[in-house]
Image: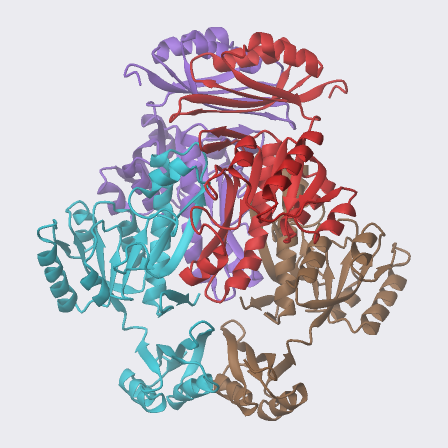
Chain colours: A cyan, B red, C brown, D purple
Amino acid sequence: MDDMSKVYVMVLRCPDRPGIVHQATGAILSVDGNIIENAQFTDPDSGMFVMRTRFRSKADAQAVRGSFAAELPSNEFDVRVRPETERLRALVMVSRFDHCLLDLLYRHGNGELDVDIPLVVSNHTDCKRLVTERGIPYLHLPVSAATRHEQERRLREVIAEHRIDMVVLARYMQILSAELCAELRGRAINIHHSFLPGFKGARPYHQAHERGVKLIGATAHYVTADLDEGPIIEQDVIRVNHTHDAEALARLGRDVERSVLYRAVQAHAQDRVILIGDRTIVFS
Amino acid sequence: MDDMSKVYVMVLRCPDRPGIVHQATGAILSVDGNIIENAQFTDPDSGMFVMRTRFRSKADAQAVRGSFAAELPSNEFDVRVRPETERLRALVMVSRFDHCLLDLLYRHGNGELDVDIPLVVSNHTDCKRLVTERGIPYLHLPVSAATRHEQERRLREVIAEHRIDMVVLARYMQILSAELCAELRGRAINIHHSFLPGFKGARPYHQAHERGVKLIGATAHYVTADLDEGPIIEQDVIRVNHTHDAEALARLGRDVERSVLYRAVQAHAQDRVILIGDRTIVFS
Amino acid sequence: MDDMSKVYVMVLRCPDRPGIVHQATGAILSVDGNIIENAQFTDPDSGMFVMRTRFRSKADAQAVRGSFAAELPSNEFDVRVRPETERLRALVMVSRFDHCLLDLLYRHGNGELDVDIPLVVSNHTDCKRLVTERGIPYLHLPVSAATRHEQERRLREVIAEHRIDMVVLARYMQILSAELCAELRGRAINIHHSFLPGFKGARPYHQAHERGVKLIGATAHYVTADLDEGPIIEQDVIRVNHTHDAEALARLGRDVERSVLYRAVQAHAQDRVILIGDRTIVFS
Amino acid sequence: MDDMSKVYVMVLRCPDRPGIVHQATGAILSVDGNIIENAQFTDPDSGMFVMRTRFRSKADAQAVRGSFAAELPSNEFDVRVRPETERLRALVMVSRFDHCLLDLLYRHGNGELDVDIPLVVSNHTDCKRLVTERGIPYLHLPVSAATRHEQERRLREVIAEHRIDMVVLARYMQILSAELCAELRGRAINIHHSFLPGFKGARPYHQAHERGVKLIGATAHYVTADLDEGPIIEQDVIRVNHTHDAEALARLGRDVERSVLYRAVQAHAQDRVILIGDRTIVFS
C-alpha cells in the first residue's frame, strides 16, 4: 500500500435520479481515488438517495474537497468528505452509573472507538477518577431545576471551545432542554435502558418485571425534545425469565446498554448513520 | 426401564412455607415414584410457591390421584397430576394466514407438539385443505359484528363437545368477547405479531417500519379481555434494518411468530407455564 | 413507477483498480438504468473486486446485455446480468427427512423463495405426496453403491433437460461423486446439520451431546468433493443445555437447519453470494 | 425477612433412586430451612442424580453441616453445603490481553461477581496498574520453558497460602503442566477464544477468517491436560461476515470472550456447575 495515500470517507445525500453513482464515482476518480468500501440506499418513502463511500487517494484534503465541490455542486448534492484521520470529537456525559462510560473509555484506549474524547462532563463527581486516570479532563457541571439554564449555557461554551462534533449521553440522567436538543439534532446520542417503544420513562426494569416480559433490551437513539422518541440507531435484547427480579433485570440490562451504546457511537463516528426524517439508515 | 411404569406430571401451587418440597416428594414416594425432572420457584412478589415435577411410577392414574389427595390436601395445595399420555386437547383457530397453523400441524405430525388436535376452527375457508389433508376436521364458523354472539355460542358448544383443554389462536384475527376471554382464562394462547409492549393494535409492522426499529419481534400470551395485555408466555426478536419495508418486516416477522407460538403452546402442553396474577412462570 | 420498466440484477467481478464503479455505473446509465440497490467489496486477500447492483431500466434484456458487453468487455470483467423475472431453476434433492423440503416448498408457494422448482428428486418415496400435492413432479431415483454411477448419469440428464441452474441438497443423505461435485461447483448447496468446522461426519448431534456443548448449529455450504469443507454460505446456532439428549438436540437442530438452508438458497437465488476461492462474499 | 437467618447453598450428587429429594429436603427441614431455589437433574447416561438447593435457615454453619452429615451419610451422598457469605476465593491469571481481566474486576467491584479475589498472577507486568489500583495484589511470575517447573511450584504455594478455591485463566497464554491440570480438576476455568470444537490451537481468528465462517464464538471450559478439550461450561457466538478480517474477528471475539468467561466464572462461583465425567450440568 502506498504510504502517501489517505483514506477518505464521503457521505452524499440527494433526491434519487439516474446517474448519481456514476457522477459521484466520477468525482472520486477525479482525485485518482480507489474505492475501498461503498454502501448506498434509496429510501422509497422519501425518494432520497444516500451513499457512503470510503476511498484511498494521494490527494490532500483540500484538493479532494475542491474537486468534490466542482464535480458535485452543493445545489444538487449534500456531500461531506473527510480524511479518516480527522476523527470526530466526542463529548461524553455521564451521571452516576459508570458501566457505559467505562466501556467507551476502555474501547477508546484499545483502539476500538474511532473518536477523540477531549473531556467528560458530569453532574456528579462519582466517575471522576475513572476518567482522569486515563488523562482525560473531567468537568463537573452540577445541575438543578434552578440552574439548568445556566448549566446548559456553560455546556454550550464547552461544546464550542472544544470543537465538539458529537455528544454521547452515557447514562446521563438529566433531560436536556428542547432548545439544546434542537441545536444538537443528529449529533447527540442517548442510551435508553429499554427496548423502545416498549417501556418509556423511568424505571423500565421495574415495568418489565411487573409485565413479566421474556426479553429486555436497550435502545441507542439520537436525542430529540420528545423524550424516548428520537431516531433509533441501534437496539438489542437479552433473554430473561421469572427468576429475575427488577434488580437482576437491571444488572443484565447494563450489559446490553453498554454494547448497544458503543455500537451506535462507533457507527456514528464512522459516518455510517444517515438521518432521513425520523428514521436512520445505518450502513453495517 | 420398566414397561409397566408411567410418567406423570404434577403441578403444585401454594403459599410458601418450610417443608413443602419434603411433603410433595413424600406424596410421590407414597406411590413409589422416581423423580425424573423437577423445577420450582418461590415468587417473592406474591409469596406463592410453584413446583412442576415429572416422575415415573407403576401406580395407575386413579391410585396416584387418590394418594395425592390424601397426602396433599386441597385446602392447602392446588395440585394437578396426570399421566403424560393423557395429552391436552387443543382447539386451533385460524383466519387466513397459514404460517403458524402449518408449523403447528407439521410439528404435531412430527411428534414435536404434545397435544391432540380434535379440530381446527376458522372464520374463513382458506386453510381448509391444509387441515383436512392431515385427517383433522375443519369447522368453518364465519363471523360478523351481527353474528358474533351466535358464533361464540357455537364455539362454546364445540369446546364442550370435543372436551377442549386449550385454545390456540394461530393468527385468528377476530376479537373474542370479554366473557369468552374470562371463561378461557389461562387456557387460550394468542400470538401477537409484535414485541409487546411495543406496537400494540393493528399493523404493527407498519408502525415498526415508520419508527425505524432495528429489531422486530412476536409475543405469545394468554388471552384476556384487555387486548394485547395478557400474561406473556414467550417472546423473540429478529434483527432488521433500513432496507426492510413493512412487507419485508411482515415476512421476517412470520418466522418469529411461528417459532414463538409453537414454543408457547408446547410449554403449556407440558404444564410448564404457571400463571401467578398477570405474570407467568415458565419452567424451561 | 413505470409499468414498462424491468428490474435487473448485475454481478460483476474483476481485479481491483480505480474507476471500476464509475465504468460499471456508466454501463447502467447507457441503458437509462436507475440503481435501486448496490453492494460491493474488495477482497484484500485476493485483490478481487466484486459488485452486485439492482437497477431499473426500460431497455429489454437483449439490449441490456448488448450494452453491457460493449461497455464492460469480457477480457476485463466477469459480468452477469439478468432481469429478476428470469428466476433461477432449482432442483431440490431430498432423502427421508422432510423438514427442510417442507420449509422450502412452503416459502416457494408463499412468494418468499425466488426460484422456480421444476422437480424434486429423491432416492426414497417418503416425501412424494408433500411434493406432488403442490403440483411439482417428484422423480424417484433410488441409488446404491452399485448403481451410483448410473444414477448420477440420470441426474445429469435431468439437470440438462430441465435447464437446472442450482441444486439444493435438502437433507439428501447420499454423497455425490467428485466429478459431479466439480461440475456443480458454486451451484449446489448442502445443509450440514452441524456448526462447521465443529462436528463433521455422521451423527453430529450425538457427538455434540457427548461433548456437552452449550450451542448447536447448522451450516449451509457449496458442495465440494471434500465433504463438509465446501465454502460456507450461512450458519446459525441455538442454545442448548444438559437436559437435551441427542434426540432433543436433533429436534432443535432441525429448526436451525431449515432456516439456515432457506436463507442460503434465497441468497444464492438473488445473486447475493459470490465465490472467491474457498470463501463466499454474501451481500445482505 | 428475618435478620438472623442465613442463605445456604447445597450441592448433592448420588446414584439415582426413588426418595432422594424427599431425604434431602428432610435434611433441610431438620434445620428449619426454607427452600428459595431448587434445581435437579438425573443424567440418563451415567445414572447420576444431581441437585442444587438454596435455602434459608437460622441455624449456623456448624449446625447445618452436622445435621446434613447425619441425615445424608457420606457413603451414600456426595454433599457440600456452605453459607453464601463464605464466597469462593478466586485466583485470576492473565498474560497481556486485559479485556477479560478488566471485565471480571469491574463486575467484582460492582457486586456482579460473587467471589473474593485475593490476588492476580501474571507472567507479564502489562496489567499491573489495572489490578493494583483496585487494591488487589498483583504477583508477577514470569515463566519460560526452563523455569516452568519452578514457576508452577511457586503457583502451588500461592494457591495454598491464599486458600484459593478456583483458578480463572483470563487469557493466560501459558500451558499448565498435566500434573497441575490434574490437581486443579474442576476448579480451573479457561476461556478459549474459539467456538469449540471448531478451531482449536493457536490463531483461531485467522483460521476462522480463512474458512469464511459466518459466526465466531468463544468457549469457557474446565482446564484439562488435553488442551482445548476440557468440559464445556459456557459458549456464545457473534455474527460476522466477509468484511471482517482476522483482526476485526479478534476484536469482535473479545466481546464474546469476556461475556462467556464472566458467565462461566459466576456460574461456578454460585455452585451452579456440576461435573459428571467430561460433561457439565449448568443450572441456570
Nearer to the camera, C268 or C135: C135
Position of D93 with respect to D180 (left or right) is left
Residue C281 in percent (x, y) is at: 56, 68
Number of residue marks: 0
Residue occupying the point 33% across, 86% down: A59
Residue A92 in percent (x, y) is at: 23, 57
The residue furthest bottom is: C70
Residue occupying the point 40% across, 54% down: A235
Q: Is residue C227 visible?
A: no
Residue A124 in percent (x, y) is at: 15, 47
Residue occupying the point 54% across, 63% down: B247
Looking at the image, residue D102 lies above or below residue B56? below
Nearer to the camera, D228 or A151: A151
Nearer to the camera, C188 or D1: D1
Looking at the image, residue D5 lies above or below residue C87? above
Looking at the image, residue A66 lies above or below residue D90? below
Q: Is residue C238 visible?
A: yes
Looking at the image, residue C164 lies above or below residue B1? below
Q: Which quarter shows the N terminus of chain C?
A: bottom right
Residue A46 in percent (x, y) is at: 42, 74
The residue furthest front is: B146
Would you identify the image quadrant in which residue B85 lies? top right
